[in-house]
Image (cartoon, rainbow, N blue to C red):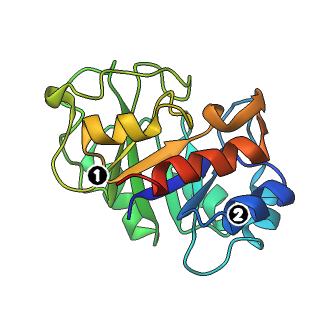
Amino acid sequence: MTFIKMCGLRDEATVDRAVALGVDAVGFVLARSPRQVTPETAAQLRQHVPDGVLAIGVFTGIGIADIVSAAATAGLDVVQVHDLRSADEVSALHDAGLRVVRAVNTGSAGDPAASFGEDLLLIDGAVAGAGITWDWQDRSLLPSGRWILAGGLAPDNVARALDASGAWGVDVSSGIESSRGVKDPELMAAFVTAVRGRG
């Protein structure tokens, strides 16, 4: 079954809705963003995430020590980091007891599929978090094994994206919003239906 992560959740009702829809993970943005929450707010939202659903903190632009501190305050044991530069940084997060989703974008230099020893790889479009689609069929950008597809996904294109890319999981944020940072319950439900209803 395809792994579904809904990201940028900012209030208890939205977290409850995502959990009720059967998603596999929810994401709390602890980086500068219209969807940003504080570690303290993330800790409150974390109380609404049951066992079996991953609660993931999303970070960029801060050091490893600050990520570890914020994750501890928020009560999170999984972090998604968009600017990891080396396997040593991943190791440092592992040493702090955190599982690591390394997020890369298709506009970065180098091979996005190269491994730093992360637990999961997420591939976003050329501009991380912008909600812009990319060439899901470009095999030079796609790794083997389990990885998460992000970038411009919505209820009307996610099935096509999965079929084209062969991704193990998907991550959605702007594609389930009625306005920037505001999740729409109907779009959330439609997204899950589109993913789960594939063949």
Q: Locate residue 89 relative to residue 87 in the image: left or right.
A: right
* Extreme residue in the bottom direction: 51
Numbered label tally: 2
- Could you tell me the amino acid type at mark 2? Ala
Give whichever of 89, 37 is nearer the camera: 37
Q: Position of residue 158 (x, y in %)?
A: 45, 38
Residue at the spot 46% in from the left edge and 67% down from the top edge: 98
Give whichever of 154, 62 is nearer the camera: 154
Q: Earlier in the sequence, mark 1 or mark 2?
A: 2
Task: Identify residue for label 1.
Answer: 88
**Residue 36 visible somewhere in the drawing:** yes
**Residue 37 visible somewhere in the drawing:** no
| Foreground: disc 1 or disc 2 | 2
Residue at the spot 58% in from the left edge and 45% down from the top edge: 191
Quadrant where the N terminus sits is: bottom left
For residue 74, the mark is 2
Give whichever of 113, 180 is nearer the camera: 180
Q: Locate residue 68 relative to residue 144 in the image: left or right.
A: right
Label 2: element kind: helix
Quadrant where the C terminus sits is: bottom left
Residue at the spot 74% in from the left edge and 37% down from the top edge: 35
Give whichever of 155, 54 is nearer the camera: 155
- Could you tell me the amino acid type at mark 1? Asp
Q: CA separation, marks 1 and 2? A: 24 Å
Q: Tag 2: Cα neighbours inside 10 Å, few (<14), some, or many (≥20)? A: many
Q: Locate residue 56 relative to residue 116 in the image: left or right.
A: right
Q: Locate residue 58 relative to residue 17 in the image: left or right.
A: left
Label 1: element kind: helix
Q: Is residue 67 above or below residue 153?
A: below
Residue at the spot 78% in from the left edge and 64% down from the top edge: 16
